[in-house]
Amino acid sequence: MTYRFPTQSNLYRGESEPVKRPKEFACFSYDEQHQYHIGDRSMKWYYTPALGADLSQGYEDFIKHDDSIDEHLDSLLTTIVHHEKETKKPIDANIVTWRGMMTKIMAVPFDNRDGFEMNATLYRGAIFIEENNEYKKASKEAQQNWRSAIPQDVMQYWGYKFETLSTIPRPWGETSRDYIENRDSHVTNNKEQYCSVVRTGIGKSIICIGGEVDAIWDSKPNPTYVELKTSANPTSGRDEENFHRKLMKWWIQSFLLGVPKIIVGFRSPDGILTKVEEIKTMTIPHMVKSMGKAHWDGDVCINFAGAFLEWLRQTITTEGVWRIRSAPKSNFIEVFQVEQV
Amino acid sequence: MGIPAAFRWLSNKYPKIVSPVVEELPLTMEDGTIIPVDATRPNPNGEEFDNLYLDMNGIVHPCSHPEDKPAPEDEEEMMIEIFKYTERVVNMVRPRKLLMIAVDGVAPRAKMNQQRSRRFRAAQEAKEKEEDKEKLLVMLKQQNGGVLKAESTEAVIKKAFDSNSITPGTPFMDILAASLRYWCAYKLNTDPAWAKMKVIISDATVPGEGEHKIMNFVRSQRNSPEHDPNTRHVIYGLDADLIMLGLATHEPHFRVLREDVFFQDSKARMCKLCGQKGHDASSCRGETKEKDGEHDEKDKPQFLKPFIWLHVSIFREYLAVELNVPGLPFKFDLERAIDDWVFMCFFVGNDFLPHLPALEIREGGIDTLIGIWKDNLPQMGGYVTKDGHVDLERAQFILAGLAKQEDAIFRKRKEVDERREAGFKRRKLQQERENGRNNYRPSDRPAVPALPAGITHDMVVNRKATDDSSVANKSAASVLRAQIQGLKAETANPSDSSEPSGEQTSPASALGKRKAELLEEDNASTPASASDTEAAEEEAGDSVRLWEEGYQDRYYQQKFHVDPSDIEFRHKVARAYVEGLAWVLMYYFQGCPSWEWFYPYHYAPFAADFVDLGKMTINFEKGRISRPFEQLMSVLPAASRHAIPEIYHELMTKEDSEIIDFYPEDFEIDLNGKKMAWQGIALLPFIDMPRLLDAMEPKTKLLSADDARRNSPGKDVLLLSDGHPTLYDHITVQFYSKKAGQSSFELDPKESDGLSGRVEKIENYLPHGSLAYPLERSAFPDVDYDRSLSVHYHMPASSHTHKSMLLRGVELSKPALDRSDIELLKRGGQNSGRGGGYRGGSFRGNGR
Ligand SMILES: [Mg+2]
């Protein structure tokens, strides 16, 4: 039996209900070897990068995490278990997943070029959603096919390099000038990560999301987190459309974890950092509208996600593994059971 | 800063850094009721400010011994004046988050030498003034046929307030501390504009100079990740170096607030003898003032001196242009360049070292250095300073560059001097011919000369320069003496007395002198009268003759009494001086590196004496912080001993005191090529601390409990009202509720509106009590239920070097300089520095 849920944006127009600010209740870190640790040991502070840096510098020494291995929800679950032990109380979420899955779902009314496939399991009254790794691998290979002047891998590196250039391991006051000024020569390593686990509500569903946080602006508790992004300097109209699409992704990602600030490193076509701008997450939907010819609508994303999650909870009522799938360029999400207990 | 003339120089060269303050004043209604300023309303300056820092000595001095109005009757009246003045400043700024009141506490040893010199001179002047008063009395008596009305003498005899009491550890400072605590609590209870404001009082019991305690605070907050990089700071104070300190914080939204020193109220004339208004000393009859109705004239609305802003943000824009060196082999970093600039300013003058002989601010000394710096920056391979540390190898470049120009600078100085002198004499003769008499009168003096072309301070502030400044050339005592001469002349020729006399505001105190230093530069080198000049020159006996070959030999022989062949001695002096520069830099950028270090000479070396600096290593030991009475014994002359517990007096007075040599009654003032006594160097013996401490120790044991309390170090106090509910409640719950636990805790900046630090319960203090007015005459009320709360406050300590960097998230103000400002500055810079060492315009600006 396959259930279908429509994704056309026009079905979800209208002002969205106010969303509570996500609240972090736990966090964990991967160290430089990608070993899991509870707590914030890999958390970084944001400090302004120097302009003029070459984002390609040090590509040869990039310590790259192999993301082809399926990590499932392991770290998120370990963290939740740890939290439950500490508080001696089970979490109350209806949905538990990585931020990346929620982003795909929320974006689908406006962007479904690549499609997605996820696996979901009902356990203890909550639906746990993870990526279907097979599908991810396949679509990634498909993407490798198109070529550009600068290799995909290098362009991907730019984003990580920008993080290296923009972060410090301790607050500014406790970091040496030498460290700050020599960030351009530091080796970039994306095995090291800091993840925040938050509780938030969308529509009638309480969700628990884990996601990587690039940097903190100030201090805990009640941190202001920062999302770091790179983007080409927008030049032509086509670029602008791309930029709008990017903004939607950034907004959803940051919105879901409650990250209020996005720092954008603008780069030249060959990867020289030329400008750094701060964008307030909250203002993005309005900003996009005021730029004219909006390609997406934040209210629709929220309304859609609320409706979909509610529907999903009504649909997935038995244990076992379920598939959540949206084919590229399709107008619906399919849900069906793939494995019974 | 002890950079005389720094303000004038800065505001001439960088005119847009100054702008007038828009001030709302209390309204007096027709029926006499006064409507106070409502500071909850938007700031009339068009911008809101977060933090106001008061370098409180800049309020205490003018309020306790004002120059333009009668002196307060007693200490209580002084406190009221201080409250009034402070209120006025607070209402101008309307800080929305924090007010910090910092009074000078015990100073580092390096500063005490200057304090000692100032205080000994103040006492000497006071003595001369008393003598002059006595002379006046004698004359009045003669005039009245040997009889003197009682009320005539009353006014003349009243002993002036000893401004030397404004030193930590004195009873006066104790009263001040109690009064400030009361007043702030009172304001927190009564003024809605204070409801959300936190107040930090760092009184004289907390070690450190006021402005440096403020700098420590700003740095401590910057190091906190919760600090808002766009905090708008204002610092009030009189010292010229506040703008340097502002730069040194690297907080771009920083302003200095001060009275407009260049504005003189021509109506505010006051007699220096009897302290009354309406006449000057030359027409003083020693009569008590007439009471004006029931109330004194003091109750009448007074003319208020206007205030000005100095904008650090705009200064930064100027420096970005001025210091830019294109084509560097390394990255240009404005923050580092600014630090180097501040460092170079120290060469030209600071409170801790005598300035280098070749560098005079009026002669464009700073421009000379900037020129050398810009020329050398590419070869130096980096900046001279880094976060308060000097790179000595690079400092050697700068000093070597200066050494190359040194001879030429001295020769040129002499030439310019002679030219000016000739011009002056010529004009003088002309005047004498015109006047047909030889009577010197101030109004005969030429008005203040035109300033260099371009926008001037006065054009910006839109006011006329006045010429009262010329009086500052004379010491207070000599002004008095001149006036008594005038009085003699007038008594002989009464018809003259109806003529307008030149009203003068003479520096009556050490502070006045500081002010005089600020005013002086337009005509400081222009002696007040020819006879003075000649006398001064004779007195100066400038036998070093810097403009003639062999001057180094003569200088070291005459000033240091060292054989000319002893070149190593010169290098030793230079090394001590470099240590001093390193000390000052640290002091400004990181906080006091050593409480005991000081420069052990009265004179500076020549630039040429600095050699092999790269081989030097400099380390400072934190050292011991003096106790208040130790500082008092180090800086006060015996004449001011009333401010010190009696038990110590004999150490200063008894002939057989083992430290009697520290307290000379008379001491030489070496004019050192200068013309005015106050510009000279007081040749006081340096205090030998171990000897002083040994002598004091047996007495210290015998101090009364109250004196012992005044001698012990105190802590900063944080006050806030219950109008700041989250923080107020948190503190009261922590310290005073049933579940009260530890007696100190870290503030959560998100709860305290950004303030970081630790608060500590004050022993024996309970909130919700009553607030008692601490003085006698109940000029302010008691408050039955005190809604304010006091706790000790500790700045967050950082083990890390404070970095001269902008913080993430800082939003710079939109540029204030336009293309023409930048062009003007660049053109002015063309003939700066290189070559003769004089900036073209600055002397011609004197119009002589
Ligand atoms: Mg001071």
Image (cartoon, rainbow, N blue to C red):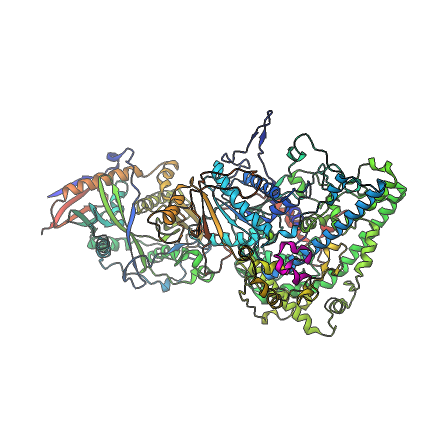
The picture places residue B676, in percent across and down from the top left corner, at 76, 54
Residue B307, given in percent of the width and then of the height, sits at 62, 41
Count how many numbered circles sit on residues in the image.
Answer: 0
Asked if B611 appears above or below B60 in the picture, the reply is below
Name the residue at 57% across, 61% down.
B702
Residue B287 in the figure: left or right of residue B771: right
Q: Is residue B813 visible?
A: no
Task: Please report the bounds of the magenta region as a residue range.
Answer: B634-653
Answer left or right for B815 relative to B354. left
Above or below, comparing residue B690 to residue B66 in the picture: below
Which residue is most to the top?
A: B31
In the image, farthest residue toward the left: A341
Residue plotted at (72% across, 33% down): B290
- Please say whether residue A77 is visible from this viewpoint: yes
The x, y position of residue B555, in whole percent, is 75, 66
Q: Is residue A7 above or below residue B717?
A: above
**In this picture, is A114 found above or below B689?**
above
Please state which of residues B326 and A242 is positioned toward the viewer in this rendering: B326
Q: Position of residue B1 (x, y in %)?
A: 63, 54
Give residue A189's quadrant in the image: bottom left
